[in-house]
Image (cartoon, rainbow, N blue to C red):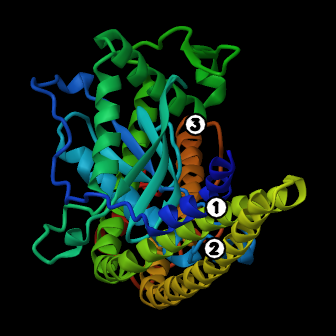
Amino acid sequence: MRYVMHLTHYAPFLLAAALAGCVSETVRVVDMTPPEQLAWDVPEELLLDVGIAVFDANVPDEYDEQISLNIQPEVRRAEGNYMAFFFKNLLQSTGNWGAVRVVPRPTHAVDVTVTATIEHSDGESLKLRARAVDARGQEWFERDYRALASSYAYEDTVPRDIDPFQTAYRTLADDLLAHLKTLSPEDIRAIRTTAELQFARDFAPDAFAEYVGATRRGQVTIERLPAENDPMLGRVRQIREREYLFIDTLDEHYATFSASMFAPYQNWRHATYDEAIAYKRAKQQARARIMAGSAAVIGGIAAQTQADDIVTRYGGLVSIIGGAGILKTAIDKLAQAKVHAEVLQELGISAEAEIVPHTIELENQTLRLQGTVDEQYEELRRILKKVYLEELGLALGSDPAETAAGSVEGTGQGADPQADTAARTADDPV
């Protein structure tokens, strides 16, 4: 009996030693598997256009929280643009969809919208929360996507179109396709028609509001259809094409941004790979040792206070001493984790210095419209709406771009001829 109790008091200590010495190894490979592709050709009228909204950077407002999560705000903000563009290219490469575009924000100009929040990102692991919704307001899914990188993914021999976290993006693309397969041709036509009618309602709510309705759950329904030769619908379609032109011009800037950001971003991810693993391992070991050490101390104290025989009390004392020793090593592991966290922060600050100029250049592309990309997109929609109303004789005035203050200033540095064309479509008659 005493022997059993003696071992019982030593059990927490033995468990802690096992936890401290155990290091799990994860097999990591470079995932070069392409997304699934449909085995048949889809008629063009049944291809859904997809909008990939710039990923939510998910940066906490509090500085201390940013530090505790090892988040460098400017790096994370750049990742929101970079990841959206990478996924857009991957999805477009499948041929399963119509036009796939990166959009500054969700828009009715597309049939399906994919949004994502970056929940964790460093050189070693990625976690995204992604959601897909069609124009009818029906949610396809909302899921977490995780991936672990292999150190080999950062080798120069790996093609640039293969991301270290390819698994997460590929799985998201496959999930989109899996849901697409559940839709009938009638469903797809309804999605495309709903998107068009909602876009029309944005520009002419009085004329198109009666064509769409909404359920109690917020889903959009088609109440009736306009005539195919409806002149107002024809104008809306031309306006929609102009918005596509603007978005496609932005796409070139996202491409330039991704190309210029690739080297510093890849270097940052590669540099943080080992540090991120060491940081995670140190924190896990510290947590395990704190739990085991605390259990040993508590068990030893219980044996000291409740046992009647000297052997059990002695075992309790040994357990207390052993538990205290484990807690001391836990403190050492926490100190190691802090060192790794500081290194990760320094690497992030260094990466920010290289990445920030590219982000600023992307977000402030003038395109003859002033402000950030998001502000320009809002400005463009306001101009297009005014053009639409003026052509119907519903609004009088001078050039619509002049009405939008500061919207047609000089092209500015960084604009290009095609960018001018995108903005000029807002000024020219349809």
Amino acid, disc 1: Ala
Left or right: 166 with respect to 410?
left
Q: Nearer the viewer, mark 2 or mark 3?
A: 2
Q: Nearer the viewer, residue 117 or 197?
A: 117
Residue at which label 3 appears: 203
Among numbered discs 2 and 3, the one appearing first in the sequence: 3
The residue depicted at 34 percent of the width and 18 percent of the height is 188
Residue 383 vertical position relative to residue 261 in the rendered view, above or below: above
Q: Is residue 32 visible?
A: yes
Residue at which label 1 appears: 292
The residue depicted at 56 percent of the width and 14 percent of the height is 221
Amino acid, disc 2: Ile
Q: Is residue 232 visible?
A: no
Q: Quadrant of the C terminus?
A: top left
Residue 355 x/y as whole percent:
43, 83
Under circle 3, the secondary element is helix
Residue at which label 2 appears: 326
Residue 352 x/y as whole percent:
49, 85
Under circle 1, the secondary element is helix
- Tell me how far mark 1 sits from mark 3, CA to CA: 64 Å
- Tell me how far mark 2 sits from mark 3, CA to CA: 67 Å
